[in-house]
Amino acid sequence: MLRCLSIRDFVIVDRLELDFAAGFGALTGETGAGKSILLGALSLALGERADAGVVRMGCEKADITAEFDLPPDGELAVWLAGQELDFSDDTLILRRVVDAAGRSKAWMNGTPVTLVQLRAVGQWLADIHGQHAHHALLRAEIQRQLLDTHAGAVPLASEVAACWREWQRLVGLRQAAERDTAAFAHERELLGWQVRELEELAFDPGEWGEINVEHGRLAHAADLLSGVGEVLDSLEEGGQRSALGHCASRLSALEAIDPALAGARELIDAAAIQADEALHLLRRYRDRLDLDPERLAGIEQRIGAVMDVARKYRTVPENLPALAAEWRARLDTLEASADPERLAAAEGEARTAFDAAAGRLSVVRRDAAAALSLAITETMQSLAMAGGKFEAALFACEASVHGVENVEFQVTANPGQPLRSLAKVASGGELSRVGLAIQVMTSRDSATPTLIFDEVDVGIGGRVAEIVGQLLHRLGRDRQVLCVTHLPQVAACADWQWQIAKETRDGQTLSVVMPLEGAARVEEIARMLGGVNITDTTRQHAAEMLAGKTC
């Protein structure tokens, strides 16, 4: 669950430190006071896109930090371990900083992360239902995703999509082979010749380095022999080695008189030893070094052959093995495409795999659709839609990446009326109520520990609002639920309540958050009930709502 939220210089918030409780919490206040701003800050911490407009006027950056408990199901812990991110104390601290130029940085438990990583983690931590979430329910893809989530069929739907893509890939290969037989034959012939040429060249990167070193040595063998001989003559015939020996002997005798000469004598002894080793190495090198014109010619021929092939294919010698591997892979593909029976068999196997996976998905969807339809229909009865009915309808369709059926949410608000598409029959108020019922029901399917509803109760009131409050309160028994609301009936059902207000400080309008208890909460519920003029009767009504709530 969400434990803490720290906000610095975000929109009209200068500095807020918020500690959240479990259960159902209501965020209330006048329109424009900043209720949704708090959720916007939390969304940024969870990886939403940002721009410079979120930085409070006159400030350099906005800084948001959110602290969550690690969910107990273990999936997120496995993901974090795979990303090598620390979570040793079962706490996740997400931080997001956006500067005045719109650039942002993100951290997780102090480790820099990408927005992709932040968004991935956010899906495990919180589920935010925006003000217009019910409008998204009119889209077919959203309806399908909700049903698959309710059915626990998201992995199976992914398997169906993968089978579809593989099937279509093989269909494309077969069609291309049938369409471009002559072109493919020419390409196969050309690739075959190129691959054979590289195989005959038998280029080896290790060999290439060795022959280049050997070529340099053979090409300059005369210079090497002359130079080594000159050094040997200088050491041997020039008496350099003898001079070192004489100096060492003389210093050894003088050292008996003054031990201070021991250091110099040791250095000359070491130099004499080093000179002896150098003489030995140079003699061996000279004896092994050979002027071999035939070997030099052979190496130059090999280097020339490699360079000719590399220039021919406009690459460097070191890239020839990778080029050969690429051509072999393409040749294998073309060889496969030249075998119609093999292509047809592979395509048939892929179609069979798709049909099997799609069939399993259809069964799961049918069972889940029946259960979801019943649950939402029951919820509608309590939302002033008595006799209304909801159905997650499945219609057979041509095979696609989503399976072999379309999902359509259908509804009727009145008894005796036929079911029709949600997009066609629901009025604004009906859509709000049906949408809320769907969101509440499908939220139960999610393992996300924190559910956030941002004014999803727009368009309802009276007894229906009280029912909505009861629904959210029941959700709060198992999950942390936060709800931005203008309805006193919903706020009265909350386990705890905050008031968000605006104040002017040093000529600036700022958002403040005040936890409400006792009389302060009664006063806020009364404000929500009575508007500008709050009477004692309104306060009494608010107190009765809080004292007698049936949530």
Image (cartoon, grey):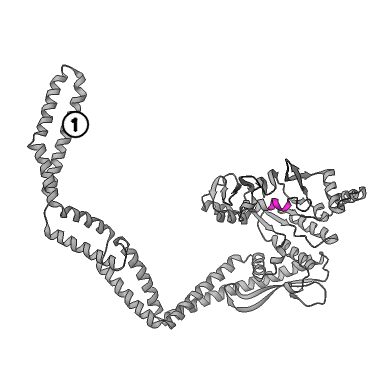
Q: Which residue is mark 1?
A: 270
Residue 531 vertical position relative to residue 410 in the rendered view, above or below: above
Counting from the top left corner in percent of width and height, residue 409 is at 71, 72
- Residue 280: image quadrant is top left
> Is 114 left or right of 525, judged from the image as shown?
left
Front residue of 82/116: it is 116
Front residue of 94/91: it is 94
Residue positioned 11% across, 33% down in the render: 241
| Residue 481 in view, yes or no | no
Numbered label tally: 1
> Is 295 left or right of 427, judged from the image as shown?
left
Counting from the top left corner in percent of width and height, residue 277 is at 16, 38
Residue positioned 11% across, 47% down in the render: 226
Amino acid at the residue labelled 1: Ala
Magenta stretch contains residue 472: no
- For the C terminus, the image quarter is bottom right
Q: Element at badge 1?
A: helix
Counting from the top left corner in percent of width and height, residue 441 is at 72, 63
Residue 249 vertical position relative to residue 444 in the rendered view, above or below: above
> Is 534 left or right of 283, judged from the image as shown?
right
Residue projecting furthest to the top: 257
How packed is label 1: few (under 14 Cα within 10 Å), some, or many (20 or more)?
some
